[in-house]
Amino acid sequence: DFFDLTIPDETPVVGLTDSELERLPTMIFTKSCTTIQDDDKCAVCLSEYIGGEKLKHLRCKHFFHSECIDPWLKTSTRCPICRGEQTS
């Protein structure tokens, strides 16, 4: 029967390990920070950055809230904005 056919398992999506996530540079956001672009907003949650929040700085120079980007990077090794690879 057609519906009894099994679909082969797809290759599991693998992101960064916990140790790789820990090695990504982080910073504390301040309003005087001039290195952050993208309208001072996290592209994952779309919230504006607030002073004192912890941000992750990816290799591609994009910034995100740590709590927003960490779950993403556990399932994907690419930046959600530019698709830049984050592994070495």
Image (cartoon, rainbow, N blue to C red):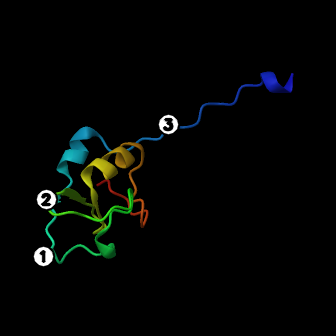
Residue 52 pos. (x, y %):
13, 59
How far apart are the alpha carbons under marks 2 and 1? 12 Å
What residue is at 60 percent from the left and 31 percent from the top? 9
Sooner in the amino-acid sequence: mark 2 or mark 1 = 1
Amino acid at dot 1 = Ser
**Looking at the image, residue 36 lies above or below residue 20:** below
Q: Name the residue that disc number 3 marks.
A: 12
Q: Quadrant of residue 38?
A: bottom left
The local crowd at label 3, few if under 14, some if 14 to 19, many if 20 or more residues have their Cα within 10 Å, is few
Q: Going by the image, does 6 lie left or right of 24?
A: right
Q: The residue tagged with tag 3: helix, strand or loop?
A: loop
How far apart are the alpha carbons under marks 3 and 1? 41 Å
Q: Name the residue that disc number 2 marks.
A: 52
Q: Quadrant of residue 61?
A: bottom left
**Looking at the image, residue 42 lies above or below residue 24:** below
Residue 17 pos. (x, y %):
29, 40
The C terminus sits in image quarter: bottom left
Q: Nearer the viewer, mark 3 or mark 2?
A: 2
Q: The residue tagged with tag 2: helix, strand or loop?
A: loop
Q: Viewer-proximal residue, 20 or 57?
A: 57
Amino acid at dot 2 = Gly
Amino acid at dot 3 = Pro
Q: The residue tagged with tag 1: helix, strand or loop?
A: loop
Q: Name the residue that disc number 1 marks.
A: 32
Residue 70 pos. (x, y %):
31, 47
What residue is at 81 percent from the left and 25 percent from the top? 3
How far apart are the alpha carbons under marks 3 and 2? 36 Å
The local crowd at label 2, few if under 14, some if 14 to 19, many if 20 or more residues have their Cα within 10 Å, is few
Sooner in the amino-acid sequence: mark 3 or mark 1 = 3
User: Mark 3 touching mark 1, by CB under 8 A?
Assistant: no
